[in-house]
Amino acid sequence: MSHWMFNCKEVSQRVSESMDRTLPFHHRMMIKIHLMMCKYCARFKQQLLILRDACRLENLHGEECDHTLTLPQALRDRIKQSLSEPIAEHNHSS
Amino acid sequence: MSAKQSGTPKQLDDPQIWVDQYGDSLYRFALARVKDASVAEDLVQETFLAALGALKNFKGRSTTRTWLIAILKHKIVDYIRKKIREQDTDKLESMSDGIDVNFTDRGAWKLRPSKWARNPMKLYEQKEFMDVLYHCLAELPDRQAEAFMLREIDGLSTEEVCKELNISATNSWVMLYRARMLLRGCLQNNWLDAEH
């Protein structure tokens, strides 16, 4: 490929980077042109976006399993007990 | 301020309330991922204690539940990572081998991304997808996994990720790129039916 065009490795880097910041205009154009010509990079980009969406979807559905399951009472009491101890220490020290 | 956010400070005043309010929810979440009741119980307990320790850093941008679940997710990955390390140390090293195996010297794909024949956005597919994702995350180098989780699972901005990990913006882009590349490859190998 010519030096003014990105190769697949560079496109994959910049596609990822574009998910974290806005790329310069000319980079966006070069990526766009590359993606029109390269099905593997286009697929790569689509899969990164699916990965992002699936992770965020989990925040809505992640706990969906048997809703009759509850935290055992003994553990519940134990956690409450341990939560109260550091608070007392913290309040004492402040 | 939203109703949810406005309700947060009161809940935060008394961490004891967390256990009654979010204990079951966290327990179910943990159990869905680790499939072992006693491990799930331990993780919930660790989560509450970690949350108490991190209380002063909680800025109330999300609900208390979302915040606690985010802590739990990190605990789950830590647990799986520890388990994998006990079982197979070679695997971790192979995951950190790098990105270059994917490309030729001239930067063309050597290991081409396969078409994903399954859709993780469908709920019934998503559970299994997330199971594999958590395992893949646990196999990543620690810092990369952390960067990915903060950015994609916790939904922090890149600036916040940098601050959290004490790294430069450029570093964060590189780290996230490597994490995404490795995860995509791991998912393709372990979950998604390949179709070339």
Image (cartoon, coloured by chain):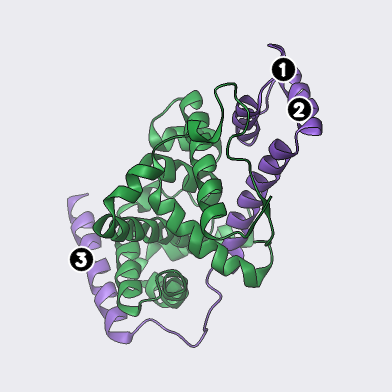
The type of residue carrying mark 1 is Met
Res B74 visible: yes
Vertical position of residue B59 compared to residue A14: above or below: below
Residue in view at x 65 percent, y 28 percent? A8
CB within 8 Å, label 3 to label 2: no
The type of residue carrying mark 3 is Glu
CB within 8 Å, label 2 to label 1: yes
- Judge by depth and name the residue closer to the eye, B18 or A17: A17
Query: Residue under mark 1: which chain is it in?
Result: A
* Nearest-to-viewer mark from 3 and 2: 2
Q: How far, Cα to Cα, is label 2 from label 1?
A: 8 Å
Residue in view at x 63 percent, y 28 percent? B108
State which tag comes first along the sequence, 2 or 1.
1
Residues beneath discs 3 and 1 located on the same chain: yes
> Chain in green?
B
Q: Position of residue B24 (x, y in %)?
A: 44, 78
* Nearest-to-viewer mark from 3 and 1: 1
> Chain in purple?
A
- Judge by depth and name the residue closer to the eye, A92 or B112: B112
Residue at the disc numbered 3: A85
Query: Residue under mark 2: which chain is it in?
Result: A
The type of residue carrying mark 2 is His
Q: Position of residue B10 (x, y in %)?
A: 46, 64
Residue in view at x 68 percent, y 40 percent? A45
State which tag comes first along the sequence, 3 or 1.
1
Residue at the disc numbered 2: A34
Label 2 sits on a secondary structure element that is helix
